[in-house]
Image (cartoon, rainbow, N blue to C red):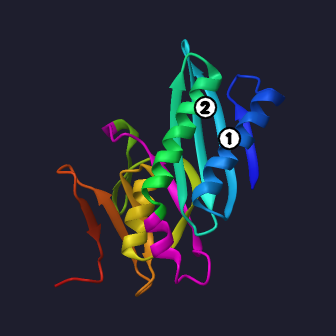
Amino acid sequence: MRYQISGKQIDVGDALSTHVKTELGATVEKYSQRPTDATVIFSRNAHEFICDAVVHLSTGLTAQAKGGATDIYAAFEQCRERMDKQLRRYKRRLKDHYKDRTQPVEFEQAGMYVLAAGEDDEWETQADGVQPMIIAEMETRVPTLSVGEAVMQMELAGSPLLVFRNEKHGGVNVVHRRDDGNVGWIDPRNLG
């Protein structure tokens, strides 16, 4: 597994890097025999150290966890424990969903844009109407998944929604966490 360990305005020494590789590697290996890469970023918020970890699995899933403590090693341990709990919870589901998958999950590149907040003076008036101002442009990856895999990926990543390409028909779908705690699924092709 490839590791990218860095710090935001923090020097991450060799001892911490070795500790992260050993402990995170052991945690991920318990639940997935095929991790591809891990990104661990340490930062500081006032008196607290923050550890953000993202692990990409060869199945296409991404597991992500965050921890914070006054000691940098304790922040990593909290992050690692959360990753462990998350992967343990989904171990059975990971095996069930991907036992029949012969190919890794396919990804498609897509544009992602950050738009201005929507104040009248920041919106541009054009011939086809009022358009928001684009602040930033980035690239993102859109996975091709089943609906069940998409829900699991959204929960593993801890994100409020996931845009994916439905592997049954190739259309773009969205799963999202609803205010009532349930999961919503938007499929424009399934209009009643």
Percent coordinates x, y for residue 56 in the rendering = 62, 57
On the rendered structure, is 118 left or right of 167? left
Is residue 117 on the magenta stretch? Answer: yes
Percent coordinates x, y for residue 167 in the rendering = 45, 82
Q: Are marks 1 and 2 in contact (CB under 8 Å)?
A: yes
Q: Residue furthest top?
A: 47
Task: Residue at 61%, 18% (x, y): give it.
Answer: 71
Q: Is residue 157 above or below residue 70?
A: below
Task: Residue at 22%, 57% (x, y): give it.
Answer: 182
Give the residue pinned by disc 2: 76
Q: Is residue 122 above or below residue 7?
A: below
Q: Quadrant of residue 153?
A: bottom left
Give the residue pinned by disc 1: 23
Q: Quadrant of the C terminus?
A: bottom left
Q: Residue furthest bottom?
A: 169
Is residue 140 on the magenta stretch? Answer: no
Compare residues 151 and 111 and report the one nearer the observer.
151
Task: Residue at 57%, 74% (x, y): give it.
Answer: 105
Give the structural element (helix, strand or loop) at label 1. helix
Compare residues 67 and 27 and report the one nearer the observer.
27
Mark closer to the observer (1, 2) = 1
On the rendered structure, is 112 left or right of 162? right
Compare residues 94 and 133 and report the one nearer the observer.
94
Label of residue 2 in the image? none
Look at label 1 and name its amino acid.
Glu
Task: Calculate the distance from the C-alpha at mark 1 to the C-alpha at mark 2.
Answer: 9 Å
Question: From which residue to which does the magenta span run?
Answer: 92-120
